[in-house]
Image (cartoon, grey):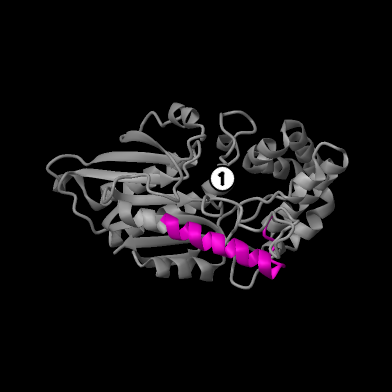
């Protein structure tokens, strides 16, 4: 079984809950779009006055609470209480890998919440909910993670062998391997959601992708991953990481291009694309601050690096990122822009 990766848990200074303002800004911008979409596009039967919402890849909060509350607010506006025999009862299903810090998630639930809660451990690349049970699904900043490193990427005898730590976009064979894995994984995600969502239900997807024609390593995120790779090689030179082990390491990350997203959705056939938009927010790119960049990378990737190379090597890598980051700030400032997407799918 492929390893599963989650964001840093807990509520401490290096936790995801304390370092997710970048993602939160996107959710704030998307709130109005979600409200409008539910008002105009949601078309379901609410005879039982029960409404099920799921957040796939929920992590530990607080962003997941913001997302589900936006959906609840919009549903309550669409179905006013005076038109119901009784108030709508909301069930919120928080999904992530079984090693996610659900304890922190549940401890930090809003005291003002007016919904029932369930934790749903498991990979969202498969079914995690009963058939025809879900009214609205949500997934933000999760779909760039693949279920596994693509085949051939870590095999020195393969034409797709990648000595870099991610898909830079410059090797045709590497790109093809990552592309194929993305199409498999995204296809599995959509197949599962298609079985779980009721007809007329909505699925909201938010996150980062690449404009068609832009390579990952031309963007700030790609440059930062390349930079982290160089820091890992420096750590290997110090003897804290075995060089061969590092050469066989790749992050299972693939920010797809717009055309790839549209193709896999159309091939799935269960959904109508109601919206596929670029959205902007105040934190469009990471702040060019070495401490912030080191901390954010530790939150996002520290668990992956520690599980593979050990805590000492991970900590040393993060120290080098902060120490050497000022040297690449001019390069980061001239990076090509990625794209923050808002996708709304309606179940056929």
Q: Residue furthest right?
A: 238
**Viewer-nearest residue: 55 or 305:** 305
The C terminus appears in which quarter of the rendering? bottom left
Q: Quadrant of the N terminus?
A: top right
Q: Position of residue 299 (x, y in %)?
A: 64, 39
Q: Which residues are magenta?
A: 166-189
Question: Quarter-wise, where is residue 220 in the image?
Answer: bottom right
Residue at position x 67%, y 57% in the image: 153
User: What residue would you read off at disc 1?
Assistant: 2
- Residue 334 horizontal/vertical position (percent): 75, 63
Q: Nearer the viewer, residue 213 or 288?
A: 213
Q: Nearer the viewer, residue 77 or 89?
A: 89
**Residue visible at 86% across and 37% down in the picture:** 239
Find residue 183 and report its horizontal and vertical position in percent.
51, 63
Q: Is residue 296 visible?
A: no
Relative to 17, is 205 on the left or the right? left
């Amino acid at each position: 079984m492929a390893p599963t990766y989650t964001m840093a848990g807990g509520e401490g200074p290096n936790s995801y809950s304390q370092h997710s303002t970048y993602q939160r800004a996107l959710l704030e911008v998307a709130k109005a779009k979600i409200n409008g979409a539910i008002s105009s596009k949601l078309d379901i039967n609410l005879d039982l006055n029960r409404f099920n919402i799921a957040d796939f890849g929920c992590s530990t909060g607080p962003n997941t609470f913001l997302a589900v509350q936006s959906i609840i607010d919009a549903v309550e506006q669409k179905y006013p209480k005076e038109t119901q025999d009784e108030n709508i009862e909301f069930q919120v299903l928080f999904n992530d890998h079984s090693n996610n810090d659900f304890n922190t998630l549940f401890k930090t639930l809003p005291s003002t919440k007016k919904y029932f809660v369930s934790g749903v451990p498991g990979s969202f690349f498969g079914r995690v909910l009963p058939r025809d049970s879900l009214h609205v699904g949500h997934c933000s900043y999760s779909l760039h993670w693949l279920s596994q490193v693509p085949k051939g990427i870590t095999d020195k005898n393969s034409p797709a062998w990648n000595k870099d730590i991610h898909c830079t976009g410059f090797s045709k064979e590497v790109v093809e391997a990552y592309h194929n894995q993305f199409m498999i994984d995204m296809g599995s995600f959509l197949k599962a959601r298609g079985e779980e969502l009721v007809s007329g239900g909505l699925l909201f997807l938010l996150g980062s992708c690449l404009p068609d024609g832009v390579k990952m390593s031309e963007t700030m995120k790609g440059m930062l991953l390349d930079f982290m790779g160089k820091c890992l090689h420096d750590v290997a030179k110090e003897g804290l990481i075995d060089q061969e082990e590092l050469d066989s390491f790749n992050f299972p990350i693939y920010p797809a291009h717009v055309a790839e997203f549209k193709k896999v959705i159309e091939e799935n056939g269960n959904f109508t694309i109601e919206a596929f938009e670029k959205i902007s927010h105040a934190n469009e790119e990471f702040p060019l601050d070495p401490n912030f960049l080191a901390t954010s990378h530790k939150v996002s990737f520290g668990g992956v690096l520690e599980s593979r190379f050990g805590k000492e090597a991970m900590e040393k890598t993060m120290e080098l990122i902060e120490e050497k980051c000022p040297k690449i700030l001019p390069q980061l400032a001239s990076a090509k822009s990625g794209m923050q997407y808002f996708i709304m799918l309606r179940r056929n």
